[in-house]
Amino acid sequence: MQELFKAAIERGASDIHIKAGDFIRARIHGDLQPLTQQKLSVDQVRSIALKLIPHEEDRQNFDKILDYDCSWGIPGVGRFRVNILKQRGSPMIVMRTIPIEIPTTQDLGLPPIIDRIANNERGMILVTGVTGSGKSSTMAAMINWMNQHKRMHIVTLENPIEFLHRDNMCSITQRDVGTDTESFVTGLRAALRQDPDVILIGEMRDKITIETALKAAETGHLVISTLHTKNAVQTISRIIAVFAPEEQEMIRIRLSETLQAVISQRLVRKKEGGRVAAMEIMPVTATIRDCIKDPDRLDEIPDLIEEGKDHYGSQTFDQHLMDLVKSGLVDFEVAKAAANNPADFDLKMNMFSGGGPGGSGVGQGTLQDEMTNMFGN
């Protein structure tokens, strides 16, 4: 089984699916492909699952498990974020691959603005996108940058722990929710007493977590977390909507004062195989802070992001998709399908010389030539 997992990682698998009554399958460059020729029995899947569960008590209660999260590693090969579930009464396992080596912002081809965002001393940074869009890799790269350039104490609250960070210039404390601390809220409240400079929260799932994270950002810490939102405006709206109507005006003010940046990402297929993240990046400027405070001005934010590309390093999804096409990394039709406004994207691309399908003849964009598939993690 370990050899099978190793082979899957070498082929660029981002996820491995193990289900009773089916082949073992792996998501390779976005497509789910069978790895075996024989289907697994319930007992085989159960046996694999028991080997992945780290705690004896949980193994003994396996038949009662409906949803279970943990992490598991193969020395010298890689680590996995594991979800064990039941479907049709039978066990199933989904494993997300996590590289052993922590990716750098350069490895992932992230724009230089990401390093500048990671250099913030305080406030809140949110990395958003759907499941599997590379949020964990982006946050790991930001923590890695801090670990190479700053002397700080970084506390992470994760469920489960994914990338294993080694202490370098920073001291990094990684806490597994459910094992090292009872919950995100409990761990976050405790973190404020642990002399942190940076607090990474795996996910802001509820009102209490969001409110505690805001307090942490307001008291001089840098808070980094994720939301399952598709862009900056939706992220702001989602946070505000969590609170009661009578609280929302104050939350707008608090959010406008603490939010430093929103990074939203989605994956698109590259021409040469694999996937790359298209990113909307919103550094929070004085004008955007005013828009966050005023509910009638939220709709102005996309235009402000687009207009701030040269001066602030911001970019919309469509601007980044245009760069990906012009640099030859992504096919025009693929980028157009992923664009927020495909018709508008088509029009803008055709304003450039040779900017039709495929972007042939267009000069090199600002992205690095070499990208990796780590955004699948």
Image (tube, grey):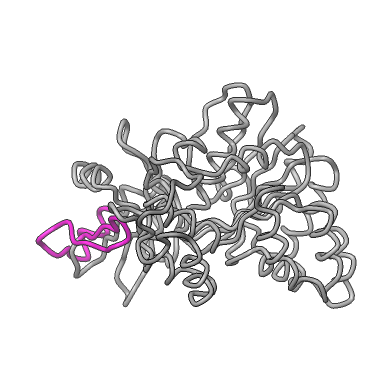
**Figure quadrant of residue 132:** bottom left
Q: Is residue 337 above or below residue 202?
A: below
User: Compared to 344, does 132 lie above or below?
Assistant: above
Q: Residue at point 38% right, 41% down?
A: 79
Kindly tell me whether residue 187 is visible in this rendering. no
Residue 63, horizontal then vertical, whole percent: 36, 64
Residue 23 rendering spot, x and y as whole percentages: 18, 64
At 19% across and 70% down in the image, what residue appears? 21
Residue 28 among those drawn in magenta: yes
Q: Nearer the viewer, residue 275 or 318?
A: 318
Depth order, front residue of 47/342: 342
In percent of width and height, residue 77 lies at 30, 36
148 above or below 57? above
Q: Vertically, is 114 above or below 133?
A: above
Q: Which residues are magenta?
A: 24-48
Left or right, residue 27 beside residue 264: left
Name the residue at the left extreme.
Answer: 37
